[in-house]
Image (tube, rainbow, N blue to C red):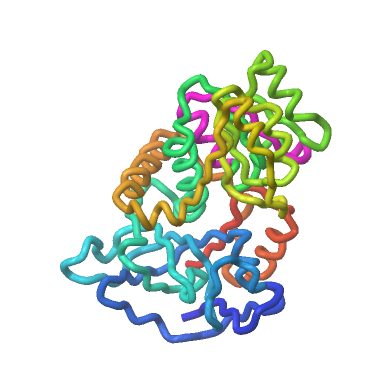
Amino acid sequence: MKTWLVKELGEPKEVLMMEEVDRPVRLKHEVLVKVKAASLNFFDILLCQGKYQEKASLPFTFGSEISGEVVESRKDGPFKEGQRVIAFPILPNGGLAEYVSVPESQVFLIPKSIPWCDAAAMSVTYRTAFYALCNRAKLKEREVLLVHAGAGGVGSAAIQLGKAFGAKVIATAGGSDKTEVCKGLGADIAVDYLKENFVEVVKRETSGKGADVIFDPVGGDIFYRSRKCIAFDGRILVIGFAGGTIPNMAINHVLIKNYSIVGVHYGYYAKLFPDQVMVEHEGMMKLYQEGKIKPLIYEEYPFEKVPEAITLLGARKTWGKVIVKIS
């Protein structure tokens, strides 16, 4: 089978090598999946560079979220040949390969109505956003949700889920093309932060109250400015630091405005509460089938174009999810 291998650390376009290797051998509590599509993520770039918090032994294949078909499983296990699934491969054996063997705990059934590329695109981002909004923020109907980086993978998921949960959604993005993307996803208001001050927009649209929940995957200056438009008793969700700067702050401000700073570490949560993850997965499948959510896909690339696709992702010239069609 063909797979993309990283044999030395460096820039993805320089270290990615496509090679022919043996099909993986399925271990007892694993499922062998024929990969149909895989989603690329920014942390894949960091893995190649050796800068990610999780280190993989060389050589490795990245690709943390895939969709595909079960081709082999244990007879008394929860999966059968021919079933459609999404799965989360474990390093060093990632999903940018024609076949991958994945622990049963990291495999989830999907309905026939979901295309392969949509399925691969709604794994980590939608699960993170679902957990953040429902579990951590406990977002209520008619509350105001401010979503930063709304045209990105996790931001676009947060916009759609926020609307599905009945919130008023204000989204920020850089450039008119990306604000139009946010509006197309259902955002009630889209703010081009290159031209407008989102703090002023939020205050104006809420009659000075501020946003009840702020979804922040950026950090840095965006976090500092978000504190100026958080509502009394509001919740700022710390999703990540795509802006590259981890903010510090004076805790007295939290006390004065009576808001919460809420951490969102989905990966650790998923390890601790697998049963709840299954409930949330079924909830997202239902929302998809009802037409309330649909992944934003920038482009679907052929398997041979992975270096080009991930280079474009690293240049931050994409929006939504970048998907690789494998078979």
> Residue 212: image x %, image y %?
57, 26
> Residue 158: image x %, image y %?
54, 38
> Residue 273: image x %, image y %?
34, 51
Q: Quadrant of residue 42?
A: bottom right
Q: Give the range drawn in magenta.
A: 156-178
Residue appearing at x 66%, y 79% in the figure: 9
- Seen in the image, is 221 located left or right of residue 275? right
Q: In which quarter of the image is residue 49?
A: bottom right
Residue appearing at x 53%, y 40% in the figure: 262
Q: Is residue 4 above or below residue 33?
A: below
Can see residue 277?
yes
Q: In this view, does 98 lie above or below 185?
A: below
Residue appearing at x 72%, y 17% in the figure: 204
Q: In this view, does 132 lie above or below 164?
A: below
Let me know if residue 164 is in the magenta part.
yes
Q: Which of 221 and 97 is in front in this view?
A: 221
Can see residue 178?
no
> Residue 114: image x %, image y %?
41, 48
- Seen in the image, is 306 located left or right of residue 195? left
Let me know if residue 202 is in the magenta part.
no
